[in-house]
Image (tube, coloured by chain):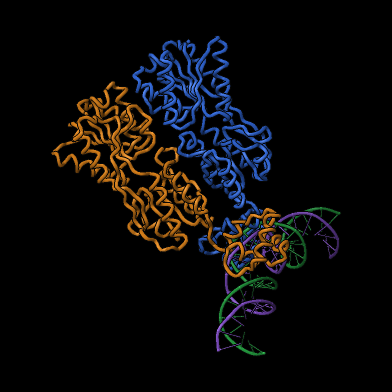
Chain colours: A orange, B blue, C purple, D green
Amino acid sequence: MVNIKDVAKNANLSVATVSRYLNKNGYVSKKSSERIEQAIRELDYKPSSIARSLSKKQSNIIGLIVPDIKNPYFPELARAVEDMAWSYGYTVVLCNSDEQTEKELLYIERLSQTYVAGLIVTTSLMDPSVYMSINTPIVALDRIIDVAIPTVATDNRKGAKLGTKYLLTNGAENLLCIRGPQGLKTADDRLTGFLEATDEQGLDPIVVTTSFDFKDAAKVIEQTLMLHPQVDGIFASSDTLAIAALHIAHKLEKRVPEELQIVGFDGIALGEMVSPALTTVGQDLYKMGAAAATMLIEQIEGKEIKQTVLNLDAQLIVRGTTRKEAAK
Amino acid sequence: MVNIKDVAKNANLSVATVSRYLNKNGYVSKKSSERIEQAIRELDYKPSSIARSLSKKQSNIIGLIVPDIKNPYFPELARAVEDMAWSYGYTVVLCNSDEQTEKELLYIERLSQTYVAGLIVTTSLMDPSVYMSINTPIVALDRIIDVAIPTVATDNRKGAKLGTKYLLTNGAENLLCIRGPQGLKTADDRLTGFLEATDEQGLDPIVVTTSFDFKDAAKVIEQTLMLHPQVDGIFASSDTLAIAALHIAHKLEKRVPEELQIVGFDGIALGEMVSPALTTVGQDLYKMGAAAATMLIEQIEGKEIKQTVLNLDAQLIVRGTTRKEAAK
DNA sequence: ATATATTATGTAACCGATAACATATTTCGA
DNA sequence: TCGAAATATGTTATCGGTTACATAATATAT
């Protein structure tokens, strides 16, 4: 591999001048610049970012920790993060933590050995202090870890309330909330929003808890719907859960949205593919991912951070699993 | 950050001995090992993989180039690759090429600057010579680039024939093949398999071409089905396309599988979520991803490669979009 | 007991960049 | 015309490891 020395020799200059030219700092004469450019072209020189990282003690790698990239929510974030990172000259390392604290810690440890420049974290099982003690820039995406950690998230409570209210104004009377795993702040907040909406109406809805796994969720939902056939409106804590509900509705031959209305949360692309297409409380996932990446890179590069917390509002996306005509 | 020198000093040994201990090569006495272990624990020392990479001219990063991680096919491969890589101590960099030669080249260039240890490529738009001229280990996943490049792929022709035949034995008579983009070998092969099956029956099926984009595909399918209402069996070049077909079938109020049977190809998780669940020609995506990662790492580490081409057979996964009862 | 092999450890060059510091050359104001 | 400021370039230590080579201590064979 040709290195900076080769370029220097070829251009009849010292490595320092070549380095200055490459980093565009310090003085380099017009003539020298041309000779360097010529040499670089001639030798097809590519600076080693490893060597650069070692000497600068700073890499251009950012770590993205997700629970599981197979969960359709995360590829949308990952894509945005990667696009943004790429455009700033950074590279994204993908990590699947499976929501296991142990595994996540191992990842963080391994990544910090690589001088990872920063971390985007979409999990929050660990004690906030763990994240805060890592001396690498970090951004929490989709989950709030601690006020002290820059965050990009959605107002889940507000969104859930919005979705639930829509269900109610659309004539649903017997509501079921399918909530995500206990202890997950996102799921907790969405439940809160749901309950706020039902409380305002003086309702007493059913709430069931399930993991985000499709099959597990389907089982729980099937049991619940069989036990409570009167349910005519479901608010699900995620689109995946909503789709599981839709799947079971078909299985039980309940017509959607005529007999049973469903509202999801997230706004993943999948929601448009199922039939009927899913009405959901949508987040702008691309915007979230891109914003998180930008915030992280600003931190890494020591720029003034304009905003450390970006809290977005979710928008109701009306599609086919709710009765449009009845809307207010 | 504490470095190897600190450890050496603490253990009252030279850096060479510590390095030998870390790499488990060369001689290190029992007593010294213990002192080193003690020092490492005491100082919480983590070797810098950047420095290691520089001196070894070898990193532990592997690049995974996919067209778009949002396409639900790729997260399943990515997950497997990442799991395998992780277990061998490697780290995966994610790259979205958008099937653009230009972008892919830029990625490869940037990655090779980082001493990327190897590449897993799931695209094949470029001239094989490009891939072969990169002097990094490479594995083609899901797509055959060249016989000289280690490959993990599925026998698409055979699989497509299998799926199509199933459609035929199940009573479908007017077949439609929704094929993926022209020039994509995978799509070409699947079409070939489809045509082999219909030719054997002396049929003259309809074939339409579309990109893998859901909306584009849905539009094409809708137009086709309106033009040819007699179609009672669809073989789709991918599960996403099959799901688009299912979506349109619902929209046009064609009952699936009674009036219209659909068979997809890929075996992505999504196929189980739609209603009815998708009958498909399934690949073991996890196995493929894991195998590709293993093959790559074996190459990187200079191990004897047992097998440079892994060609798997696809399996028919019968679910709800075909008429089970009519099966042979 | 001595030669030789094996085990154990240290010194220092090297990987490919950056950057502090030194030095040389040019520009320009007074 | 002289000296300071601005411009241009070079030398070399450094980042944190690995490893070739040298050397020392021990074990083993004859």
The answer to whether residue B301 is seen in the rendering is no
Q: Quadrant of residue A200?
A: top left
The residue depicted at 39 percent of the width and 36 percent of the height is: A269
The residue lying at 55 percent from left, 22 percent from top is B191
Residue A283 appears at what percent x and percent y? 34, 43
Residue B32 versus residue A226 in the image, above or below: below
Residue positioned 32% across, 57% down in the render: A147
Viewed as shown, does residue B281 lie left or right of D9?
left
Left or right, B219 with reference to B310: left
Q: Nearer the viewer, residue B126 or B305?
A: B126
Q: How many marks?
A: 0
Position of B218 with respect to B112 (left or right) is left
Task: Indicate the quadrant containing the C terminus of chain A: top left, top right, bottom left or bottom right.
Answer: top left
Q: Name which quarter of the figure residue C4 lies in.
A: bottom right
In the depicted structure, whether residue B101 falls above or below residue A292: above
- Residue A133 against residue B214 in the figure, above or below: below
The residue located at (32%, 45%) in the rendering is: A184
Residue A62 appears in the picture as rendered: yes
Q: Position of residue B28 (x, y in %)?
A: 65, 58
Please provide percent x and percent y for residue A217. 33, 32
Left or right: A92 in relation to B21:
left
Q: Which residue lies most toward the left here?
A: A202
How far from the left and from the top, in percent, is residue B254? Answer: 36, 17
